[in-house]
Amino acid sequence: MFKRNRRLIKKLAVAFVVVIVYIIGQNIMVPYVRVDEAEPLVNQTFVQMLQAINGSRQAVSVFSLGIMPYMMASILLMLKNLGKSDKKRISVISPKKQAKILTLFICMVMAFLRTAEFEYTQFLLGSAVVSRLFAMLVLIAGVFGIIWLTEVNTGDGIGGMSLIIIVNIMKNIIRNVLKIWSGFESGVYGSRKDICQIAVLVLIGLISMIMLMLFEKAEFRIPVQKVMIYNEMSEDNYMAFKLNPVGMQPMMYVMAFYIIPFYLFNILISLFPGRRFLVLLAEGVQLDHFTGLALYLILYFLLALALAMVELSPSDLAEEMQKSGDCIIGLRPGRETQDYFKTVVLRLTVFSCIVLGGLIALPMLLRIIWGLPQEMTMIPMSLMFIGGISRNISLEIKTVSRLDSYQEVL
């Protein structure tokens, strides 16, 4: 058994160690910083969603900044390459190094803002400035520690970055379930209305999970004429596009991108205190308001479309088909095929965004209308993420397991 599945067992062991190291890092506190700091933003929907993916803000650990800076850097580089073919993306610095350099700059900004919230128990070398700089260095090192863990897990483990995210989501689910349970015990919850609201949110979560998994599995197939194949086998030749072209990436990346307006208004308010219009704008971008929810959905749609165009790249697909001599029946190779691919990608992305984006927005809309507590609002999105990520990890496990079964033949 061990010999037959040694590759899978080794990868699972590496993934387990990565999870343990990550959890330990989340419990190593930044030196000279008060652990029980107040968190005035914890009840905001955006902060709760950020915590679900990125880890808790309430714990002042070395991993407090989480993986978001790296995700934000990846998004910005992706947007920079939007519309460029693979040949035009050639650079002296590799994309991975570019992402890490940009991550460093983002970390410096986020660490500067994060350390402004800290309460220090002791000043290093008797200086508040030195203490803050030291805390910033610890937080930046923590981000690159997480990046290293994800790279190790991507190469030798299972799940890549998704494993880190699913650990955060599971911890957030446990934390919210305990809050709800505590609310029932203390009498805060318990009415028929509370029970019905929880049942509705759980139902939305289960439907969201099922729909996401269906979208990940379903395919849109385009019949393709292969060169030199003119027998009955030609009927089975096709090019497949997932019904959800870029998977769960926009759902996670939109949180990283949404940080920009969120922190921007907080910075402006601190620089220009007493400006009422800045306060109103800051409140307007929060997900607890209709304008903030609308902005979130717009960013989600734009990111999904950008990711689809970059990752699927209709121009590259059309060029590869032209070089191989394959063609889509009824279409000329080249520009006409490229335009057709763009139309397919656009339609699939819009359709998946309407369905999945609507399921994401519905609990937040119910929170605004019904005044739901935050721990209830996170139930559907948490279930959706758990379902999507678990499916991807299970597929990776099956792939490795099948590779092990062919080891003797190879």
Image (cartoon, rainbow, N blue to C red):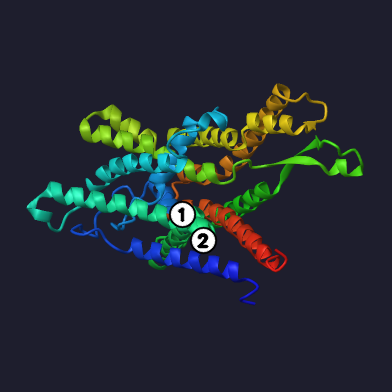
Residue at 64% x, 77% y: name it. 1
Q: Secondary structure at mark 1?
A: helix
| Camera-nearest residue between 307 and 214 | 307
Residue 241 as seen in the image, left or right of residue 142: right
| Camera-nearest residue between 297 and 30 | 30
Residue 287, visible in the rendered structure: no
Residue at 9% x, 54% y: name it. 125
Q: Which mark is residue 151?
A: 1
- Which is nearer the N-term, disc 2 or disc 1? 1
Residue lying farthest to the left in this orientation: 126
Quarter of the image for the C terminus: give it: bottom right
Residue 290 found in image quarter: top left
Residue 217 at x, y = what percent? 69, 50
Residue 372, visible in the rendered structure: yes
Amino acid type, label 1: Glu
Q: Secondary structure at mark 2?
A: helix
Residue 331 at x, y = what percent? 79, 25
Residue 30 found in image quarter: bottom left
Residue 119 at x, y = what percent? 18, 53
Residue 126 as seen in the image, left or right of residue 12: left
| Camera-nearest residue between 404 and 389 | 404
Residue 70 as seen in the image, left or right of residue 387: left
| Camera-nearest residue between 204 and 262 | 262
Residue at 30% x, 49% y: name it. 140
Q: Is residue 212 above or below residue 277?
A: below
Characterize the local packing of mark 2: few (<14), some (14-19) or many (20 or more) Cα atoms within 10 angstroms: some
Residue 25 at x, y = what percent? 34, 62
The number of numbered badges drawn on the structure is 2
Q: CA distance from mark 2 to mark 1?
A: 8 Å
Q: Which residue is mark 2?
A: 156
